[in-house]
Amino acid sequence: MAVLAQTRPIALGGGFSFAGLFTAFSAWNDRRITRRELAKLSDRELEDIGLCRADIDTVIDQIR
């Protein structure tokens, strides 16, 4: 039985790595969840936290 020891990230070519893909996916998912939760709030609730519906995209763009 063979054992493979990997001591460096596996590159996909072009400088991409699995860690980079995971990070990008995590950031996308965080933005998706935040957008969904903010959209659920009423206008009054958004006003209470200092936002309006038009601000949601601005907030989402600031998440990395």
Image (cartoon, rainbow, N blue to C red):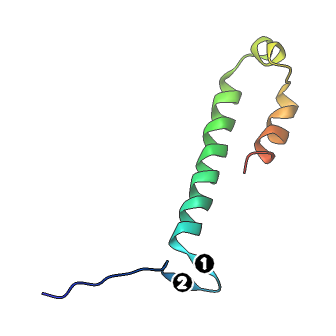
Distance between the alpha carbons at the discs numbered 2 and 1: 5 Å
Q: Nearer the viewer, residue 60 or 1?
A: 1
| In the image: residue 37, left or right of residue 11 | right
The answer to whether the residues at label 2 and label 1 have Cβ atoms under 8 Å apart is yes
Q: Nearer the viewer, residue 64 or 28?
A: 64
Q: Residue at x 65, y 86 (%)?
A: 14
> Which quadrant would the N terminus be assigned to in this image?
bottom left
| In the image: residue 24, left or right of residue 11 | right
User: Mark 2 Cα within 10 Å, few/some/many (few <14, many 20+)?
Assistant: few
User: Against 44, is 40 above or below?
Assistant: below
Where residue 33 sits: x, y (%)? 60, 39
Residue 44's image quarter? Answer: top right
| In the image: residue 58, left or right of residue 64 | right
How many numbered discs sit on the rendered protein? 2
Mark 1, secondary structure of its residue = strand
The residue that disc 2 covers is 12
User: Against 36, is 31 above or below?
Assistant: below
Q: Residue at x 51, y 71 (%)?
A: 18
Amino acid type indicated by mark 1? Phe
Amino acid type indicated by mark 2? Leu
Where residue 36 sits: x, y (%)? 64, 34
The residue that disc 1 covers is 16
Q: Residue at x 81, y 41 (%)?
A: 57
Where residue 31 sits: x, y (%)? 67, 45
Mark 2, secondary structure of its residue = strand
